[in-house]
Each structure stands twice: as C-alpha cells, then as structure tokens.
Image: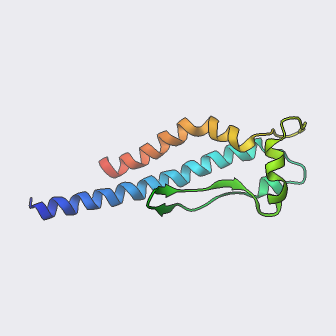
Amino acid sequence: MSVRGIQNGLTELHRAMRAKGAQGLFEAGNMIMTDAKRRVPVDLGNLKGSGYVTAPTATPGGTHVEVGFGGPAAGYAIYVHEDLSAHHPVGEAKYLENAVEAKAQAAFAHIAKRVEEALYG
C-alpha cells in the first residue's frame, strides 16, 4: 500500500470514528434525558415536556450536544432544579444533574461502543 493509500485510509477511519462518536454522543444525551424526565417534578407537565437534546455540533474543541429543559418552562426550570427545600409529590430537585451523574458511566461506555464500531465494524 502506498503512503497516499495509508493517508486516505487513516483519514477515512478518522471520519468514521468522529461520525460514530457523534452518533453515540447524541444517543447518550437521549439516555440522560430519558432518566431526567423520570426525575423531573410534574405539576402541569410543561417542564417535563420541554426537555430536549440537540443534534451533535462539531467545533474546533470537539463535538457537543446540549441536554436541557426550556421552552415554555425556561423561566422556572432553574428554580425547580435548584430548590432543594421544595417538596415535590412527583419528581425531585436536581433532576438533570442527578440524571447526568446516574448515567455518566453508561453514557461513556455507549459512546466508546459506537467508536469501536468504526474501528472493528
């Protein structure tokens, strides 16, 4: 194989790894969001319904997704999240933070699994 062939092969592998990593990152974000929606306090359902995961975005610093709550609930989502003294008949404070902590290990393993697919098929 020529040097050019090796370079092309490595370039293609890099592209495939980034694509699979982005796919895994988006799926991991959805895994976290699913758990967060199980934890979010529910009154009328606006907060729970406002949960979102953005599509992967590539930047010079890496690939990113955003997991959050907002929309019609943006004005009070942070207060519900941070108020540890509030009693919620359904759900809990720190609903997003707790979901991230609970799912972090599984999320990283899932992303790694997707990247491995690019390496080993």
Residue positioned 43% across, 43% down in the render: 112
Residue 72, given in percent of the width and then of the height, sits at 82, 63
Number of callouts: 0
* Residue 4 figure quarter: bottom left
- Residue at 79%, 44% in the rendered image: 81
Q: Quadrant of residue 15?
A: bottom left
Q: In the rendering, at what x and y percent does residue 89 appear?
A: 90, 38
Q: Is residue 121 visible?
A: no
Farthest residue, direction left? 2
In screen coordinates, is 94 left or right of 24?
Answer: right
Q: Residue at x 56, y 56 (%)?
A: 65
Q: Give whichever of 116, 66 is nearer the camera.
A: 66
Q: Find the residue positioned furthest to the front.
A: 61
What percent of the width, then of the height, locates residue 97?
Answer: 69, 41
Name the colouring of the figure: rainbow
Q: Residue at x 53, y 56 (%)?
A: 64
Quadrant of the rendered structure where residue 104 is? Answer: top right
Side of 68 relative to 86 (left or right): left
The answer to whether one can see residue 56 in this image is yes
- Is the residue 8 above or below the residue 51 in the image? below
Q: Quadrant of the N terminus?
A: bottom left
Is 92 displayed left or right of 36 in the figure? right
Residue 99 picture location, percent across and down: 67, 40
Vertical order, 63 against 107 (above or below): below
